[in-house]
Image (spheres, rainbow, N blue to C red):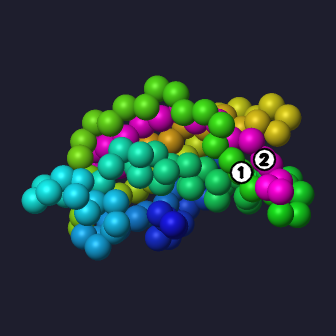
């Protein structure tokens, strides 16, 4: 499930992506009947995916390694996101210790924050 439509900009420590949600997305079906909104967990996943794209570009990763979420902190939801909305997804690398990466994510709709979170990822080789 890819939740990033395009990369708007990227530096060594920050990425900005864009996503337009459609009414056909499986996660808005029944959330909530007659008043669909994008679930908070999906907003978090958007930030995690943007962070993973950033880490894939800047981190030295072994063949087959992937960034895996290990922690979410200080998650706050400020405004609702609905089908048809186009959001900006920001992820910023705050710190890096060994194979642990600490990031801040936020999602914006019309310049207003819809979600904000701190998260950590580690680089792992599934197997």
Identify residue for label 2: 123
Circles 1 and 2: CB atoms closer than 8 Å = yes
Label 2 SS: strand
Reply yes or no: does residue 69 show up in magenta: no
Residue 13 place in picture, x, y as percent: 66, 46
**Image quadrant where residue 62 sits:** bottom right
Q: Position of residue 102 (x, y in %)?
A: 66, 34
Write the residue at 43% across / 31% down: 75
How many neighbours does mark 1 have within 10 angstroms: few (below 14), some (14-19), or many (20 or more)? Answer: many
Residue 60 visible in rendering: yes
The residue range painted magenta reads 107-127
Residue depicted at x 52% and y 28%: 73
Residue 86 in sight here:
no
Other-residue count near label 2 (Cα within 10 Å), few / some / many at <14 / 14–19 / ≥20 = many
| Labelled disc at residue 120 | none
Extreme-left residue of the structure: 34
In magenta segment, residue 123: yes
Q: Which residue is mark 1?
A: 67
- Left or right, 23 with respect to 8, comes to left
Q: Quadrant of residue 24?
A: bottom left
Distance, label 1 to label 2, CA atoms, is 4 Å
SS category of the residue bearing label 1: strand
Q: Is residue 39 left or right of residue 1?
A: left
Q: Quadrant of the C terminus?
A: bottom right
Q: Which residue sits at x=61%, y=33%?
A: 71
Among numbered discs 1 and 2, the one appearing first in the sequence: 1
Coordinates of residue 79 in the picture (x, y in percent): 24, 42
| Residue closest to the eye, 44 or 125 | 125
Q: Position of residue 54 (x, y in %)?
A: 66, 55
């Amino acid at each position: 499930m890819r939740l990033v439509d395009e990369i708007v900009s990227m530096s060594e420590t920050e990425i900005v992506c864009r996503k337009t949600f459609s009414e056909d997305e499986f996660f808005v079906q029944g959330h909530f009947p007659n008043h669909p909104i994008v679930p908070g967990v999906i907003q978090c996943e958007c930030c995690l995916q943007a962070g993973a794209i950033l880490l894939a570009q800047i981190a030295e990763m072994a063949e087959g390694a992937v960034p895996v979420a290990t922690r979410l902190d200080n998650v706050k939801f400020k405004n609702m996101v609905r089908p048809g909305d186009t959001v900006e997804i920001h992820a910023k690398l705050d710190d890096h210790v060994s194979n642990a990466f600490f990031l801040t994510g936020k999602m914006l709709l019309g310049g207003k924050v819809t979600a904000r979170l701190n998260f950590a990822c580690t680089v792992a080789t599934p197997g």
